[in-house]
Image (tube, coloured by chain):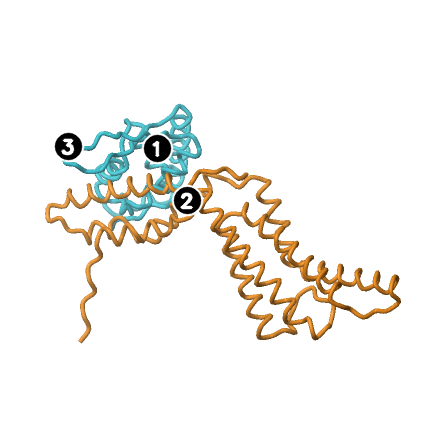
Amino acid sequence: MARTPTRGDVSALILAVLGEGALHGYAIAREVERRSESALALREGSLYPALRDLEASGYIVGQWDDAATPTGTPARKTYKLTATGQTELENRAREWQIYARALNGFLGGKLDAEKT
Amino acid sequence: MLKKPEPQSLESYLSQIERELRDLPSQARADEMREIESHLRAMIEARGDGSIAEALRQFGKPRKVGRDLCKAWERKQPESWINSALALVAGCLFVSGDTLGGRFFSFSTYLQYFFAGNFGYHDKTLATYFLVEVLLSLIVGATIGFLSPKRSRIIIALSFLLLMLSNFFPDIAFGFWFRFPTIYVPRFSTYAFLLLCLLIGSRWGIRFSKKHKIQIV
């Protein structure tokens, strides 16, 4: 069953996706969907408050691409990671790994035990 | 027989979001709406059947999206200490205005006794009292111009409540020390009415300054 990420998780997801390259909001949502294999049920509207928070913290910068897309859709704003954002991403990844390893100690072995 | 609710259109969805962003500067609001609309149109286009309803459901409830975005903007632009101080001054004056006016009135009556030998109030003293109330209202109204739109809405609502109370329950007053029945109702109502007009005027001033990018503080 798909899980809705919390607000803190959404900003971490955005940082992780932008760590691979600059993207606009819609592309960020599609990339989260692809990489999570639809396991994360992201309310796409929740991306924009998280993007504003990350901009305010200086982790990302946004820039309008004023040329309209070929299909005539409105111009898009592309976001990219700053140097501070890259450091923040590394810190969060490290914290997550410690947290996941701790949880895995409690829950991770249970599924394997049931399989054997 | 109950009718099926009409499927929501993209325009009505966007207008619900925009309503929640009314406190943002106009350019910022326009940028946010442009970005959201671009995202939504891409979602609708990506769905082969062009289904709007499912795309809107996946994007989230419009009022929640708008409110969360508005809060993110408020976090982005923290209030300066000047605005916080002015809000405190306005709040204190709002609560104590009646008392301060009453104190001045009392001082005027004592002066009258000292010079004229009697405690009775007359038109000049009453006029002084009202003048103090008007002055206090002007000060509160001017400081309200620097408050956040949310706070000014709260104080407008309180002023309206004060106006209603003073009209229907003239004995209810906070900080009131005098019991002159003849001036009870008009004095309290005057203060609340003046304050309400000034607050509404200052709210218009805030919107005008944002629209024309005039920096107040």
In the depicted structure, whether residue B31 falls above or below residue A18: below
* Chain identifier of the orange chain: B
Badge 1 amino acid? Leu
Instruction: Classify mark 2: helix, strand or loop.
Output: loop
Q: Residues within 10 Å of mark 3 (few under 14, many from 20)?
A: few
- Marked residue chain, label 1: A
* Chain identifier of the cyan chain: A
User: Quarter of the image holding residue B80?
Assistant: top right
User: In the picture provided, is A85 more to the left or to the right than B141?
Assistant: left
Residue underneath mark 2:
B24
Quarter of the rendering occupied by the N terminus of chain B: bottom left
Residue B90 drawn at (x, y percent): 61, 51
Of the two numbered discs 3 and 1 in the rendering, the one whose residue sits closer to the viewer: 3
Badge 3 and badge 1 in a common chain = yes
User: In the picture provided, is B98 more to the left or to the right than A44?
Assistant: right
Residue underneath mark 1:
A15
Residue at 78% x, 63% y is B106
